[in-house]
Amino acid sequence: MPPIRTVDSIIAENKVVVFSKSFCPFCKKVKALFDELKVIYECLELDLMGDEGHILHQDLIKKTGQTSVPNIFINGKHIGGCDKTLALHADGTLQTMLDGTYREYDYDLVVLGGGSGGLAASKEAASLGKKVAVCDFVTPSPIGTTWGLGGTCVNVGCIPKKLMHTASLIGETLKDAPCFGWEVPENVKHDWARMVDEIQTYIKSLNFGYRKTLRENSVTYINAYAQFCDPSDPHKLKVTSKSKSYEITARKFLIAVGGRPKYPDIPGAKEFGITSDDIFSLPYCPGKTLIVGGSYIALECAGFLAGLGLDVTVMVRSILLRGFDQQMAKMIGDHMNKHGVKFLSECVPTSVERIEEGTPGLLRVSGKLKDGEVVSGNYNTVLFAVGREACTKNIGLAEIGVILNTDNGKVICDDEEKSSLDHVYAIGDVLDGRLELTPVAVEAGRNLAQRLYGGSTVRTDYSNVPTTVFTPLEYGCVGMSEDAAVALYGVDDIEVYHAHFQPLEFELSKRDNFISYAKLVCVKSEMERVVGFHVLGPNAGEITQGYALTLKLKATKSDFNRLIGIHPTCAEVFTTMNISKSSGAALQKTAC
Ligand code: FAD
Ligand code: NA7
């Protein structure tokens, strides 16, 4: 009689064991995987082993609690069934188990940064059964502003920005209200402190909601600053909270630390200036404000501050909205100027001095024009919007071997957000060469988690991402600027259809008469495929979101022509545009 085999004796004698049934498709899948990986394994087809098979199966159930097959062991460690094995293969763990380099970690995944991208990725990974932690820590701004969980968008970006933009639009609507029969008292005043208080209360409710959702999704929230601390162990992280410092390990890391505003290197900038990190919680009205910078954060802040009735000047080094369609950028600048925003063009700041204490106090700002002329002015507040820098300094990434772009400190990754280290990934604002937008970070985070742990192969499609600049007259766009399309296809292959339109809601007050504008940039040689969509007008974001799909689906101008509009809306202008730039015909003016 041969000695009676037990599950324990079999797994002790063999590195890899598959308890299988010959007809089971899941068993076949696992065996095929091991064959493909050229793994030598002991396979026991329990259904073909008579009584011994039955006894072994009962023994297996007792040992593992698992009734189904396949039931897999590697180096004596119980792995589980088919799904578990495939998932371990997908995230690279199976290989480490097979080649003997397997190591137990505190977490499967640690995410550095609890912003838009980090939160999305961590919840998705946890929902796929992984042990996940998120480290999030807000370093106070130079004037001491700090905030809660959720990152830039929720605390010092999209959310408070759009709410302040809304506050300013309400002011505009109040001016129109008498034309609609409302009796509005004269000298209606805006209360800055009340607005900030309401916005901050709302944001705190969002911070609370994020903490709750992490708990509900079994993601560990570590309110601490995370740094790789040991170049010889790239799986180890030091986390430093307000009260203690300790180390954790993880199989994989996701860098989602975002960015923070830059300051120009001039005297007084950090001592007396503020940035978008401070404006949304500023407890006092900023008063007469100088905004330095010509990009979208500068213009949006200038727009809502002016809309709230403040005296606003924008100091622009070169052009407005670099990277955006320059015809649209000029229209935005002209519109803002008409509404009282002053522009100090081709000028850079050289110093900021305090000349009066107070909240807001008084500052003297000096600057230099392009021709060398020195200018200066007094302002209550100076807000710098001169770009953002990736939060990758001092977190030990380069030391563990992660390659960063030396110009901007961002993490260089492949098309699957993997860095130069196999177990380190990056998404969101810190990922080099991608758009800095919340939905982009969220999509990348979800897709990455699905690929790492859910067997997905879907990559994030970074093309044709719609966006909106929330200036007083909003600007929405998707696809290429006219300038970029001409550069790529050549001027002869581009046709632009355009129209000015008047939103119905502006008609009674005759506000911004026919300033709103729409254009489609089309490639002639591709049956006038639309490669650029641009709209300047109320609710441009809402309009652009819907039409963005048409660019994804490669719509042509004739598709737009065949689409029936919704009347009376601003969006319908895109269904009726028939004047092309090349025709030289007088610009169409459409009332909605
Ligand atoms: P973040 O949201 O920045 O999150 C990173 C988190 O990591 C932060 O909480 C940070 O404190 C933390 N962190 C950093 N280093 C560490 C560390 N070492 N350890 C632990 N934690 C760390 N996008 C839009 O789509 N629409 C808009 O209208 C819009 N408006 C904006 C307006 C403004 C004023 C700004 C500044 C940005 C705006 N954005 C907008 C951009 C959007 O906010 C960002 O693209 C988005 O927040 C990026 O998400 P993220 O996850 O990459 O990083
Ligand atoms: P951007 O988009 O990087 O733009 C920075 C702006 O600031 C741009 O107009 C620059 O002018 C200007 N700038 C840069 N440095 C200076 C100095 N030293 N002095 C004066 N002006 C300067 O930054 P934002 O802050 O608007 O937004 C950053 C990102 O955050 C953005 O991509 C969003 O998605 C989220 P330039 O055109 O270079 O002459």
Image (tube, grey):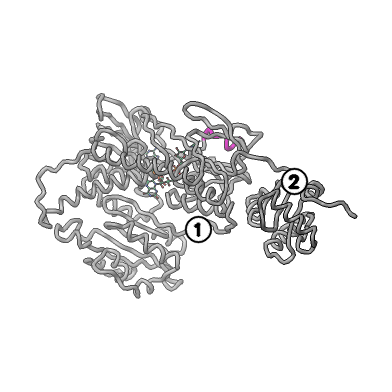
Question: Residue 508 is drawn in which quadrant?
Answer: bottom left
Q: Is residue 486 left or right of residue 359?
A: right
Q: Is residue 428 left or right of residue 521?
A: right
Q: Name the one closer to the observer, 6 or 238.
A: 6
Q: Is residue 270 above or below residue 3?
A: above
Marks 2/1 in contact by CB < 8 Å: the verdict is no
Q: Nearer the viewer, mark 2 or mark 1?
A: 2
Q: Is residue 14 above or below residue 273?
A: below
The disc labelled 2 sits on which kind of residue? Gly
Question: Residue 378 is drawn in which quadrant?
Answer: top left
User: Which of the labelled discs sits on residue 490, or is there none?
Assistant: none
Q: CA distance from mark 2 to mark 1?
A: 42 Å
Q: Is residue 361 left or right of residue 216?
A: left
* Magenta run includes residue 216: no
Q: Report ligand 1 position as a quadrant.
A: top left
The disc labelled 1 sits on which kind of residue? Asp
- Residue wearing tag 2: 76
**Residue depicted at x 72% and y 52%:** 60
* Magenta run includes residue 394: yes
Q: Tell me the magenta residue range.
A: 393-400
Q: Position of residue 559 (x, y in %)?
A: 38, 73
- Residue wearing tag 1: 461
Q: Position of residue 486 (x, y in %)?
A: 42, 62
User: Crowding at label 1, few (<14), some or many (≥20) Cα neighbours within 10 Å?
Assistant: few
Considering the numbered disc 1 on the image, is that residue within a helix, a strand or a loop? Answer: loop
Q: Position of residue 209 (x, y in %)?
A: 40, 44
Mark closer to the chain start, 2 or 1: 2
Q: Quadrant of the N terminus?
A: bottom right
